[in-house]
Amino acid sequence: MAQVAPNLFQSLDDDYVCAFRRDSSGRVSHLFTSGTTALERVPWLLSVAVQRQVFLLCALALVLVLVGPTRRWLLPEQLRAPASWAANSFGFQLLGLASCSSFCVSRGAREQLYVRLPWPIWIVQTLGLLGLGGVAWFMARLLRLRPRAPLAWLAGVVLMLYAAWLWQWRLLGYWF
């Protein structure tokens, strides 16, 4: 590759070119290649490392809320039912998403860039909406009761963070 213009490079062997787009601060934000390929720099919040940590934190919190003894230890009586509803819905949704992508999509289709998900995925995604309803029920009770226990507030924050994570990845089954 040789630079033929600012942010434009051409192959020495053929007509292949690639170009870079810079943002207002001068940092490279996009890479364009010959044809229709365009790549965009991923913001740090969407990086694999951050997404993995958010998911693991939320999954651990969901497991703690799912298990009866830890739920009784973490939350006051009035908050246990909505927290359990939300955690069970989200847990079964994750299990359903994994099952649909593993059993309903062929191995060859999974290796392709674009996969059309099978129809059961829409049923599974409604569990995310039920979980979102559980989060709303939990937060309404949490704000009404205003417990002094910081773990109850932490559970509310984690449930809201998980709902936001699901929405960001469009796993709740609706689009804005």
Image (tube, rainbow, N blue to C red):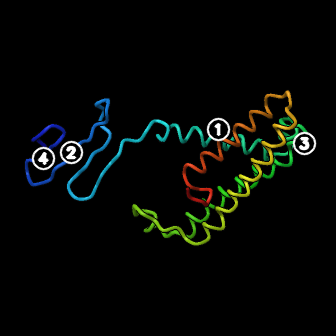
Mark 1: secondary structure:
helix
Q: Residue 76: image x %, image y %?
A: 89, 37
Q: CA distance from mark 4 to mark 2?
A: 9 Å
Residue displayed at 32% across by 48% down: 39
Q: Which residue is mark 1?
A: 57
Residue found at x 75% / y 37%: 155
- Say whether marks 1 and 3 touch (CB < 8 Å): no
**Residue 45 x/y as whole percent:** 50, 37
The answer to whether 135 is drawn above or below residue 95 in the figure is above
Residue contact at pointers 2 and 1, CB within 8 angstroms: no
Q: Amino acid at mark 3?
A: Gln
Quadrant of the rendered image containing residue 141: top right
* Amino acid type of the residue tagged 4 in the rendering: Gln
Q: Nearer the viewer, mark 1 or mark 3?
A: 3
- Vertical placement of 110 versus 63: above or below? below
What is the number of the mark on residue 10?
4
Q: Residue at x 20, y 47 (%)?
A: 18
The first of marks 2 and 1 along the sequence is 2
Q: Which mark is residue 19?
A: 2
* Left or right: 29, with 122 as reference point: left
- Rounded to the nearest whole Å, what is the CA distance between mark 1 and mark 3? 24 Å
Would you name the residue on which mark 3 appears?
78
